Image: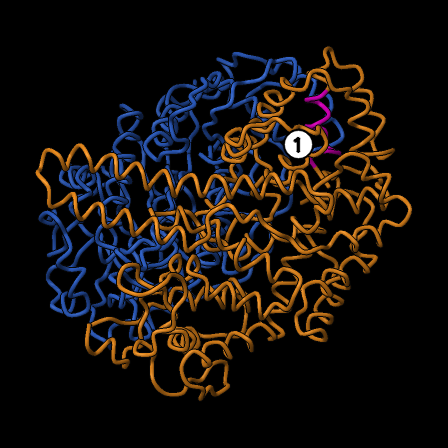
Chain colours: A orange, B blue
Amino acid sequence: MSQNSMSSTVINHSNIAVNRFGYGARGDELAQAKQDPKTWIKSQLLPIFFNTTLPHSNDVFIEHEKYQKQKKQLKMQQQKQLENKSQSVNKMTKNYARSALRDMSVDTLNQAIHSSHSVSWRLLDFFSNHFSVSANGRLMVGLSATLEREAIAPNLLGNFADLLLAVEQHPAMLIYLNNEKSFGPNSRMAKKRNKGLNENLAREIMELHTLGVDGPYQQADVIELAKGITGWSVKRQGKERGEGFVFRAYGHEPGSRKLLGKKYSQQGIMQGSQMLRDLAMHPATAKHVCYKLAHHFVSENPPEPLLDKMEATWLKKQGNIKQVMFSMFDADEAWLDTAQKFKTPREFVISTFRVLGLNKMKDKAILNSLTTLGQQPFNAGSPAGFSDDVNDWLGASALMARIDWSTMITGYVKRKNTETMMKLAFGENVSQHTYQSVMRAESRQQAMTLFLMSPEFQRR
Amino acid sequence: MKNFTEINNASNEKSAALPRRKFIKMAGASLAILSFPMSSAFAFESKKQTVKNKIVWVLLRGAQDSLHTIVPTFDPQYKVLRPKLSTSFKSPLLSLEKGFALHPSLKNLHAWYQEKQLLPIVAVSSGYARRSHFDGQDFLESGKSDIDHDSGWLARAIDIKQKRALAVSRSTPISLRSSDSVNTWYPSNLKSSDDDIYSALAKLYQNDELLKENLEDGLEVRGLVGEQKRNKKKRQGKFIDLTKACAKLMVGEQGVDCAMLELGGWDTHNNQGTRLNNKLAELDNGLAELKAGLGYEWQSTIVIIGTEFGRTAKENGTGGTDHGTGSALFLAGGAIAGGKVEGNWPGLKPQELFERRDLMPTTNSFSWIGSVLSQHWHFTKQELMQVFPQVKAYDHVLLRS
C-alpha cells in the first residue's frame, strides 16, 4: 500500500491505546487512558469469562445424539408419517445448533461491545481467528463457537503451548479438520476396520497454527505429526460414556516418530502432546505468531525491531502470550503516530456500537451486520480464518456496503450529538477537514454517517 | 520429476509500480458528474468494436479433486487407489474421448463438450510444488515465480490490452491487483444510501486516496447494476446468483471485457463422494446461468476454470483425499474449439506419481492460459512475458476457427 494513501492525521498515545490496541472508545476511555496510556492498556489485559448458561460442547453432542435417535425411530414408522415428522425433527435440532451458534456468537460480540477491557476481547478474537473453525455441517454449526469459550479463553493469557494443546484436543477442531477418524495405518483399528490416516489437521497445525507456511517442515513431517496424533478423537454418543475428547489407543500408530529431525519415542497420547509442545516453542512458531499479532494490532508492515522484541520475549518466557503482548506495548515501534490499519468489519461494527453506546440492538441485527459486511462469525470458510490484510477489506463493493450499513445504523441514533461522539472517539485527533465536513452536514443523520465513515474512524 | 521441474522453471520479477486510475477515466466520467444513472459510461469505447472477446476466470478455492471430476476410466490403477471413491458415483459417468469421463453432476458442461464448447485439460499445475492452499492460490493468482500479493496475471493482461475487468467480490482478489481498470461488485442486502451521502463522502475523502478511489469505483458499478433491492431472506452470494449478475455486467455496450468469479468448498478430506456431488452441481448450474446471461456474447467468450492444485491419487482413511499436486483446467465457451480432452496423461502407477502420491503434472496451467491470451486477445510473445514471466504459451490451436 502506498504511503500517501494513508490518513496523515497525527494521533496521540491515548488514542492509539484505545483505538489501535482496543476495540475503540466506549464512554470516556480516551480520558482514562490519557494520564498513562501504556499502563492503562497493560491493565486492560485481563482474563475473560463466559456466560455459563449457554451450551457447552457436551450439550451440543447430547442434542445431536437425540436428533440421531429420533431420526432412527422415525425411519421405522410409516412412510407418510416419516415425511411429515422428519421435517419437524430436522428443524428442531437445526434450531438447537443454530441458536447455540447465534447465542454464543452474539454473546462474544456483546461482551466486546460492553467491555471495559476491550483489548482482551481483541486478543480473544485474534486467537479465535488464528484457530479458525467454520460452522459447516450440522454438528459444526453447534460446535464451532464453543472452541473459543472452552479452549481459547481459559488459556488466553498463558503459555502458547497450553493454548495449542487445548485447541487441538477440542472436539470442534478435531472434527473440523477431520482428525477424529484418523487412525494409524498399522494400528489395531486400521487392521480390523479398514480405517486410515487423514493428514488434514497435522498439516494445518504446522502451516497455520505453529510454524507457518514458510516454516522448516516437509511433507514427511506432516505425515509424522499426523501419525503422532492418530487416536486423538471424540467420544461417540450413545456408544461411549460421556462426551468430548478421547484418546483411542487402539487407533494410534505404534512405534516412535521423527518430527523435524527429533525422535519421539513416547507412547500413546504423550507422543503427540510432546510434538505440539515442541512446535509451540519452535523459533519459527515464535516468528509466525508474533508477526501475525503485530500485523493484526499494529501495522500492515510491522517494523522489524518490534518483531524482534516480541520473538525474543516468546523464546525467553516460554511463549507466554501476556508477556509477548506486554513486549508489544513496551515497544516504541508499536506507537507509530499515524493510522496504520484499516478496520476489519468486526472491528468497525464493534467500535461503532461502543462509541454510540447502543444497547438496544437485537441479536439478529448485530449478527446480520457482520454477515452483510463479509465477516460472519465462524464462517471464514477456511482454516486460515479471515484475512488481516487491508487489500481484502478495502474494496469498492465492501466500502459501499459500509456506507449503506452506517446509514442504516445512524437511522436509529438520530438524537445523539455527533460532535460529542467525535470527541469521545478521537479526542483532539481529528483533521480540520473531517471535523468541518461532519459539522456542516445537512442533517444529523448525515453528520453521524460521515463521522462513522471518516478516515479517522475507518482507520486505526 | 523431470516434467515437473521443467514446467516449474522460473525467473524473478519485481512487483509492478503503482498504477494510475483508469477505470473512471476510461469511462469519461469525473467525480463531479458521478451520479445515477451512468447509462452511457462506456459507449464511446464500444463503438470501435461491436463484439468484444471476453474472458471469465473462475477460481475454485480449496484444491478441487480433478481425479473425481475427469475420471480416467481406462486406467486400471484408478480403482486400486480409490476403492471407495471410484464406486461412489450415484449415476453413470458422462463419457468423453480417450476413455475419460466427466462426473455425473456436470450435466451442462457435458452438453457443452458435445457441442464442442468445452475443453478439459488433464494433469496440469501452476508450477507450485508444495501443498498449502493459501500459498497455492496466491501463486496461481499472482502468475509470477515468486508470489506477489500486489500484482495478478489477469491485472497485467488487461493493462497491456487496455481492457476493463470486474471481480465478483467485495474487494479485489490477487488475480486482479495492480490494475486501475478493475472494479468489484458483490451483492448486498442493505438499502442504498441517498445520493447526497455519497457526494458528501466523496468530498470527505479528498485527502485519503484509497478511500476515494474505492468510493468512485463503488459508485461506478452501482450506476451500472442499479440500486440494490432489499432482500432479507435470500442467502447472499450463492454461486448461481453471482454468475447471473456477472453476466449482466459483461453484456452490452457497457459490459466489461473480463470477469473473475470464485467458488470455495473443494477441500474434501472426508465424505468426498457426497460433497463433490453437490459442489459440482453448484458449479455446473452456475456456469449454465453465466452462459444464459451472456446470450449471443457467449460466442466470443472463453471461461477458464482452475484450482490451486489437485489431491492425492489415493483416497485417504476417511473417505476423502488429501492435498496433492496435478489438477485439471477447463476451458469453455463459444470461442473454444472443444469436444476433446487435452493434456498428457502421466499414469497412476506409483512410479508415475509425483512424490509417489500425487498426479504428476505434465503441462503448465499458465502456458495454457497464455495460449488463450495470445489467441483470444492477440498477445505477442513479448506482451505475454509481462503476464507470465516464467512460461511460454503452447502452440495448440484452442479457438474455434
| Residue closest to the eye, A216 or B269 | B269
Residue B383 visible in image: no
**Residue A451 inside the magenta-drawn segment:** yes
- Amino acid of disc 1: Phe
- Name the residue that disc number 1 marks: A353
**Residue A314 inside the magenta-drawn segment:** no
Residue B78 visible in image: yes
- Image quarter in which the C terminus of chain B is found: top left
**Relative to B401, residue A118 above or below:** below
Is the residue marked by circle 1 packed among few (<14), some (14-19), or many (20+) residues within 10 Å?
A: many
* Left or right side of A94 for B218: right
Instruction: Tell me the magenta residue range.
Output: A448-458
Q: Residue at x 71, y 49 (%)?
A: A119
Task: Report x, y in % for residue B194.
Answer: 60, 13
Task: Report x, y in % for residue B190.
Answer: 51, 23
Quadrant assignment, res A416: top right
Task: Report x, y in % for residue A286.
Answer: 64, 69
Give the overall secondary structure of the magenta segment: helix
- Image quarter in which the N terminus of chain B is found: bottom left
Task: Report x, y in % for residue A342.
Answer: 67, 41
| Residue closest to the eye, A135 or B229 | A135
Q: Chain of mark 1?
A: A
Q: Helix, strand or loop at disc 1?
A: helix
